[in-house]
Image (cartoon, coloured by chain):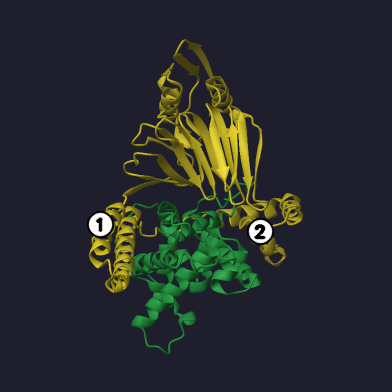
Chain colours: A green, B yellow
């Protein structure tokens, strides 16, 4: 099925032995996923990149004293989350609860720089995904794109595995309805298996 | 009707969390009814939707910045240490001599601390890449893998680091061993070809030609062609056994996948892959479109499979392939 869960704790051990190439490898491997995750909190490309780099810098600086007992991938995503929170604290009033970032904040998460030729259907689905509630979309992305397990997501976002499942179920239901509605509108066949 | 959908099972199945029993339970439900099948397909389709395009982050620029910041940090740490030793030296009677050698050492260590430029090659899902390293070693990198290597190799050794899977055809250089680092496992060769695969719990090194040394901690193994070493992280041990090379290396020939692809394009792909020339009997054949997944171990098999789905016959003489049949509208 999808890719197996990968955990690069071995590379971290190399980093502990001053292997800079291992740090470079990890950085390259996780950069896209971590930046996208950071953007979900920060809604700003530069800040997201900065906050991912900060995590790797501190990983290097503290390599001798860090002890990562749990899953390494979950550790990275969690570290990026806290790095993003620190960044938010710098620019937002201190009393605002960062766990309740309003959905409106994520309305246009990818900016408008990317002009991409998309099919009518793709555009339609994009809109559907963007209407998913903040947390729901975040969980969906971590599971479906970044390939994190329930256990990892639960560790990173501090929510129960049951909640994760509910978020995913909600995402699927909304997207499925959307696909159906779209097909009805355009008169396309609803599914391949329809007799 | 909608209420009876086992959404939780479907979700667990799609996100790779389902146990075997759960998967079977779900498949029973899917098989029980045509409409179940349809609902399931819709869910799969919803799950597979592409996300709105995230901005593509420039890894190479970011990597460069990262290394610059670390270099800066290392220099600061070094100069702190130096000023500390200054105090100690000042107390010493042999002030001048030691100070002079301290300056000399700091120059030396600064020289050694010159930043090394790294190149990283990363493959996306479904993308296999072949390229040459600065020493003419050929690397075939499997999908979803990352290889990092210095822009120019050091004089004593050639060292690269890998996540994922790659096949190396190493240029022989007896003075500079070629070393592949994959976490704790180190593979060292002089000139040979071998496959390295890293999984979450295992590292597998399989040898096609030549001799390879695989080491992990104090332990090390010598591998000959058609042998493989497996390192299992959980038990922290290396194991040597024989290996079927064809199956280990089969990832280098992924199946061809066509989706409503015009036959002319299919022909172009096959021509390039198998080094043949394909001609059509009549123009109507070129209007056919092909959908399906084809193993690429032999051209005959691919052509036979295409023939079945489109009602096309083929004949071959040397590297000339001739397609005939009624064609499509």
Between A157 and B319, the residue placed more toward the observer is: A157
Residue A9: % across, % down: 55, 57
Between B232 and A160, the residue placed more toward the observer is: B232
Q: Tell me the element at label 2.
A: loop
Label 2 or label 1, whichever comes before in sequence order: 2
Specify whether B192 is left or right of A192: left
For the residues labelled 2 and 1, say whether their Cβ atoms are less than 8 Å apart.
Answer: no
Between B43 and B269, the residue placed more toward the observer is: B269
Q: Tell me the element at label 1.
A: helix
Q: Quadrant of residue B270?
A: top left
Tell me the residue that label 2 is attached to. B17
Residue A47: % across, % down: 34, 70
Q: Residue at x 54, y 50 (%)?
A: B184
Q: Residue at x 46, y 15 (%)?
A: B322
Front of the two marks 2 and 1? 1
Q: Chain of mark 1?
A: B
Classify mark 1: residues with Cα within 10 Å, few (<14), some (14-19) or many (20+): few
- Quick check: do tags 2 and 1 share a chain? yes
Specify whether A115 is left or right of A129: left
Q: Residue at x 54, y 62 (%)?
A: A72
Q: Is B174 located above or below residue B116 in the figure?
A: above
Q: Quadrant of residue B140?
A: top left
Specify whether B78 is left or right of A94: left
Tell me the residue that label 1 is attached to. B104
User: Which of the numbered marks, if any, corresponds to residue B145?
Assistant: none
């Amino acid at each position: 099925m999808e890719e197996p869960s990968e955990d690069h704790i071995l590379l971290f051990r190399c980093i502990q032995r001053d292997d800079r190439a291992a740090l470079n490898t990890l950085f390259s491997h996780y950069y896209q996923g971590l930046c996208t995750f950071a953007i979900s909190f920060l809604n700003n490309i530069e800040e997201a990149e900065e906050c991912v780099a900060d995590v790797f810098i501190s990983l290097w600086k503290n390599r001798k004293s860090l002890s990562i007992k749990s899953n390494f991938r979950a550790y990275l995503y969690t570290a990026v989350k806290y790095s993003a929170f620190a960044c938010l604290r710098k620019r937002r009033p201190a009393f605002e609860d960062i766990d309740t970032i309003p959905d409106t904040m994520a309305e246009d998460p990818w900016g408008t720089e990317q002009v991409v030729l998309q099919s009518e259907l793709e555009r339609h689905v994009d809109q559907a995904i963007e209407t998913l509630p903040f947390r729901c979309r975040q969980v969906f992305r971590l599971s479906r794109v970044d390939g994190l397990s329930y256990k990892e997501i639960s560790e990173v976002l501090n929510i129960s595995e049951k909640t994760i499942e509910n978020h995913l179920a909600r995402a699927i239901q909304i997207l499925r309805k959307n696909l159906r509605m779209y097909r009805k509108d355009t008169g396309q066949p609803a599914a391949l298996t329809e007799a | 009707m909608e209420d009876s959908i086992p959404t939780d099972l479907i979700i667990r199945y799609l996100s790779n969390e389902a146990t075997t029993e759960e998967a079977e339970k779900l498949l029973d439900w899917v098989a029980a009814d045509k409409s179940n099948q349809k609902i399931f397909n819709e869910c799969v389709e919803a799950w597979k939707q592409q996300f709105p395009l995230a901005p593509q982050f420039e890894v190479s620029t970011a990597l460069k910045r990262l290394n610059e910041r670390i270099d800066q940090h290392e220099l600061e740490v070094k100069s702190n240490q130096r000023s500390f030793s200054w105090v100690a030296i000042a107390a010493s009677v042999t002030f001048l001599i030691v100070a002079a050698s301290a300056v000399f050492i700091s120059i030396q260590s600064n020289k050694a601390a010159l930043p090394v430029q790294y190149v990283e090659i990363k493959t996306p899902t479904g993308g296999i890449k072949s390229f040459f390293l600065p020493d003419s070693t050929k690397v075939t990198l499997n999908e979803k893998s990352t290889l990092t290597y210095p822009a120019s190799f050091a004089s004593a050794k050639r060292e690269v680091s890998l996540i994922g899977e790659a096949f190396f055809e190493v240029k022989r250089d007896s003075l500079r061993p070629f070393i592949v680092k994959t976490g704790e496992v180190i593979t060292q060769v002089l000139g040979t070809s071998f496959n390295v695969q890293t999984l979450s719990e295992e590292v597998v090194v399989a040898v096609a030609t030549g001799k390879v040394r695989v080491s992990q901690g104090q332990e090390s193994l010598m591998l000959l062609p058609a042998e493989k070493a497996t390192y299992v992280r959980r038990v922290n041990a290396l194991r040597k056994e024989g290996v079927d090379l064809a199956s280990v290396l089969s990832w280098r020939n992924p199946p061809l996948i066509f989706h409503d692809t015009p036959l002319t394009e299919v022909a172009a792909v096959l021509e390039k892959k198998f080094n043949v020339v394909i001609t059509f009997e009549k123009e109507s054949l070129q209007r056919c479109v092909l959908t399906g997944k084809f193993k690429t171990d032999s051209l005959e098999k691919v052509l036979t499979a295409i023939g079945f789905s489109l009602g096309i016959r083929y004949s071959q003489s040397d590297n000339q392939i001739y397609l005939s049949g009624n064609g499509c509208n």
